[in-house]
Image: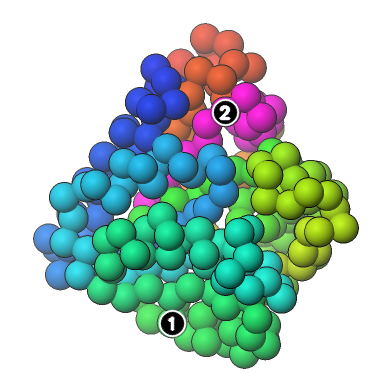
Amino acid sequence: MKLVVCNSTADLGTKSSKHATELINKAIAEKGSARILLSTGASQFPFFEEFVKENIDWSKVEMFHLDEYVGISENHPASFKRYLLDRFVLKVNPGKYHLIDGTKNPEETIAELTSLINESPIDVGLIGIGENAHIAFNDPPAVFDDTCSYKVVTLAERCLEQQIGEGWFKDKDECFKQAISMSATQIMKCKHIISVVPYKVKAEAIYNTLTHDVDPMYPATLMKKHADCTIYADPDSASMLDAKLIEEYK
């Protein structure tokens, strides 16, 4: 695992986007196409602002995403399908994209996504880290040895609080309590992982990820076992890290 502490949130957006673009263009050059996995949420705004401007042959890109609430309509402002349509798909028109429909039967959706994602490896995975260190909606204690690619999960209290804090819901009564989530096992199959983690609310999550051994209570620690994972932090999200720890992961 590598850590890049950027000069600002804007700098984080630029550097993480350039890194992703380099890897995607390399995959396209080598095999004619690239498969990518995208995260959502407020923390990914700086990345998407830059990513959609990049010089990529989007017609050769196939996109998946990590999760979606069970029962949510794409017209709901908190829908991750809606998020990606507005901030990515409708801006770059990728060659293929597979958005999770929260209104469909979850088991049928999971079967369809599993078949599609296992056709070939994901080249680049953008994997955010939640305030409780979750990856996708694999909340603590996370299952690290799932054999499935996607599953239905019940969201932890801290996870629901994050969604409220980001402004997607007014309170817990409004929140959707279950989601279809990619498994931690499937996330780890990405050839390259880029984790964009800005803002003060993520400082504890980054600190716990870097200071703990691989531990289901801190799901993001699993990415320490990945061959090529880079975390991008801004000054706020890196504020709990001392110089020695930053240097250790440089």
Q: Which residues are magenta?
A: 192-210
Report how far apart the C-alphas of labels 1 and 2 lie in the structure: 34 Å
Q: Nearer the viewer, residue 241 or 93?
A: 93
Left-right relation of 246 to 4: right
The residue carrying mark 1 is: 116
Q: Nearer the viewer, residue 181 or 199?
A: 199
Residue depicted at x 38% and y 27%: 10
Percent x, y for residue 98?
A: 43, 75
Left-right relation of 156 to 78: right
Residue depicted at x 36% and y 43%: 49
Left-right relation of 85 to 152: left
Q: Secondary structure at mark 1?
A: helix
- Depth check, mark 1 against mark 2: the one in front is 2
Percent x, y for residue 123?
A: 33, 60
Q: Secondary structure at mark 2?
A: loop
Q: Residue furthest right?
A: 173
